[in-house]
Amino acid sequence: MSQGWLWSFVVLAVGTALWFARWSREPKGLPVTAYLLAAAILIWSAIWHAVMALGGAHTKVGDHDVHWGHYADWIVTAPLLGYSLVLTGTYALASKRLDLVAVLTVASVPMIVCGTLADLAHEPTTRYTVYGVGVGVVNLVVIWGPLRMTAARQPAPMAAHFILVARLLTALWLGFTLVWLLGPSGLGILDELTTTVVFVVLSALMKVAWSAVDLGRLRLLADRDQLLVA
């Protein structure tokens, strides 16, 4: 049954990537790379969901299966989503704050690595400690620290848009964390099938819906002459 959910995501992701590619032909003031970045996130994620749907990218650790295909997906898409958020927070600024791009991108990698190591750990306390450290780095320190302060320097409509998409992305990241803790790798309240299904839904919300909201609202600001790209 989980294969059906995984394949559904593949179809949705590829279709949305083509939609973003079409949008890129009429960028409405946004860099074409913004659309290509969103499409690349979806294609990479679709590849790994297809691999998992075919029965690959998992191994047995202790009494539970580690579906490392999720981590292979996230190790690339999490930094790229962070990069997309930095772009949204700096479009109107002459300085694109490459330091924030580097910090958020680099911080995303240990978050995923910590999740992988925690999943492979046999001792529960080690799992929770390692994973908790990884999650906190990105969500609490980087996004809601210097990046929010930088985004506030943009025109009011763009600053408000950043706050909206930052809240959405943070909530989705925390959603992944909660499901991980409740799933077989954590407390075991959710079984493997339920965890897979919820991960697929969260992936669709994060990579399809979030990118559509981000790019779609920016295009709407452009229609209202409220989009400024330095």
Image: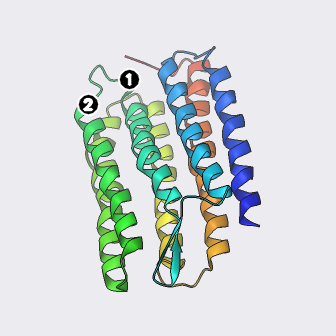
Q: Position of residue 4 (x, y in %)?
A: 77, 58
Residue 58 in the figure: left or right of residue 52:
left
Residue 59 image label: none
Q: What residue sits 74% from the left and 51% below the top?
A: 8
Q: What residue sits 43% from the left and 39% below the top?
A: 80
Position of residue 93 relative to residue 48, above or below, is above
Report whether residue 204 is seen. no
Which residue is at the front of the view, 215 or 225? 215
Which image quarter: residue 194? bottom right
Q: What residue sits 36% from the left and 72% below the top?
A: 118
Q: Position of residue 86 (x, y in %)?
A: 37, 36
For label 1, the SS is loop
Q: What residue sits 72% from the left and 35% below the top?
A: 15
Q: Position of residue 127 (x, y in %)?
A: 36, 77
Q: Nearer the viewer, mark 2 or mark 1?
A: 2
Label 2, on which residue?
A: 98
Q: Position of residue 56 (x, y in %)?
A: 59, 58
Position of residue 135 relative to residue 158, above or below, is below
Amino acid bearing label 1: Ala
For label 2, the SS is helix
In what quadrant of the picture does the C terminus appear?
A: top left
Amino acid bearing label 2: Leu
The first of marks 2 and 1 along the sequence is: 1
In what quadrant of the picture does the N terminus appear?
A: bottom right
Separation of disc 2 and disc 1 at Cα? Answer: 14 Å
Label 1, on which residue?
A: 92
Report whether residue 179 is seen. yes
Which residue is at the front of the view, 209 or 216? 209
